[in-house]
Amino acid sequence: MSTMTEGTLESRNVTVRGLTIHYRAADHAAPAGAPTTVLVHGAGASSRYLIPVAEQLAAHCRVYAPDLPGFGKSDKPGKVLDVPELADALAAWIEAVGLERPALLGNSMGCQVIADLAARRPDLAGPVILQGPTVDQNARSVLRQWWRGLKNARHEPASLQEVGKQDQRDCGRWRLFWTAHYAASDRIEDKLPRVQSPALVVRGTLDGFVSQSWAEEVTRLLPHGRLVVVPDAPHTMNYSRPVELAALVLPFLREHEGAGVAPSRAVPSGAASPA
C-alpha cells in the first residue's frame, strides 16, 4: 500500500484482485469511536468530486472514498464492469482495507452500487445514505438520463464541470457510455426491499435526475427508509452542498451507530433535516 498527502485527505493505493485501487482517506483526525463512512461515486466520476463532503465529515468520521475499477486513479480493467460487478469490487476493497460494516454514502449510480452490495452482502454494510439515487424506473435509458443531466447541470456549480471533464478523461468515452448503459438498465427497485440496513434517502428539490415521486418510491421500497428533501439543492449535493449534506448524515450515523437492522421506519416529507 502506498500513501501520499492530498489536502486534508490521504491518497492511497491497495491491490485488490490484481488491480490497483486508489482511494482517498481521512482516518486520523476523527475522535475515538467515530463511525466509519465509505463514499461511493457515480457513473463516469471518481472520488474527486466527493472531496468536499469527505472533508466535512472528516472531523467526525473515519472517511474513505475509493475510485471504483475503471475510474479516477484506479486501474482500468479491459472489461467495463456493470453495477453488480462494481458492487463486488467495492465489497472486495472493503475487505482488503479491513473495514467492518462501514456506513455507505453514495451519489447517483453510487447508490445503485450500494444497494446491490447491501442486498447481497449485508455482513459488509452498515447504515446507508442514498443521495440522489438513480435510475428512475420511468427514465430507464441513456438518452433520458442524458436529457435529465442537461436540466440538472443548470443548477450545479460551474467548477463541477471541470472536475467532471477530468473524470471522464480518466475513464474514457467507451467506459463512460457502457457504464451509463449498465446504470440505466439496472433495476435498483428490485434490490431495495432486500436492504436491511437503516437507510437515509436524500433528495434536493433541484435534482434533475431524481423526481420527488421517485425519491418517495425508493424510500417506500426500503424496509427501514427515511426521506429528507433539501430545498434548492441539485443532484450532486456531495459537491455543491457538502455542509448541508454532512449536517444530515452525521445525526443519522450517530442514531444508528453499531446498528444492523433498523428497529422502525419513518418517512418525513419536505424536511430540511432528520427529526
Image (cartoon, helix red, strand yellow):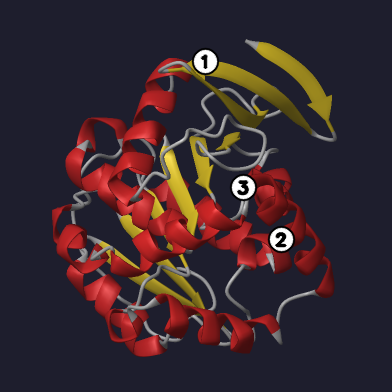
Measured as percent of width and height from the top left, residue 193 is found at 14, 61
Tell me which numbered mark, 1 or 3, is placed earlier along the sequence: 1
Distance in Å between CA atoms under marks 2 and 3: 11 Å
* Residue 51 against residue 27 in the figure, above or below: below
- Identified by mark 3, the residue type is Cys
Tell me which numbered mark, 2 or 1, is placed earlier along the sequence: 1
Distance in Å between CA atoms under marks 1 and 3: 19 Å
Q: Identify which residue is drawn at 24% across, 39% down.
A: 260
The quadrant of the picture occupied by the N terminus is top right
Q: Identify which residue is drawn at 35% across, 84% down.
A: 139
Measured as percent of width and height from the top left, residue 128 is found at 37, 51
Is 88 situated left or right of 131 in this image?
Answer: left
Is 137 situated left or right of 162 in this image?
Answer: left
Q: Identify which residue is drawn at 38% across, 42% down.
A: 86
Image mark for residue 15: 1
Task: State the residue position of label 2.
Answer: 164
Q: Is residue 238 visible?
A: yes
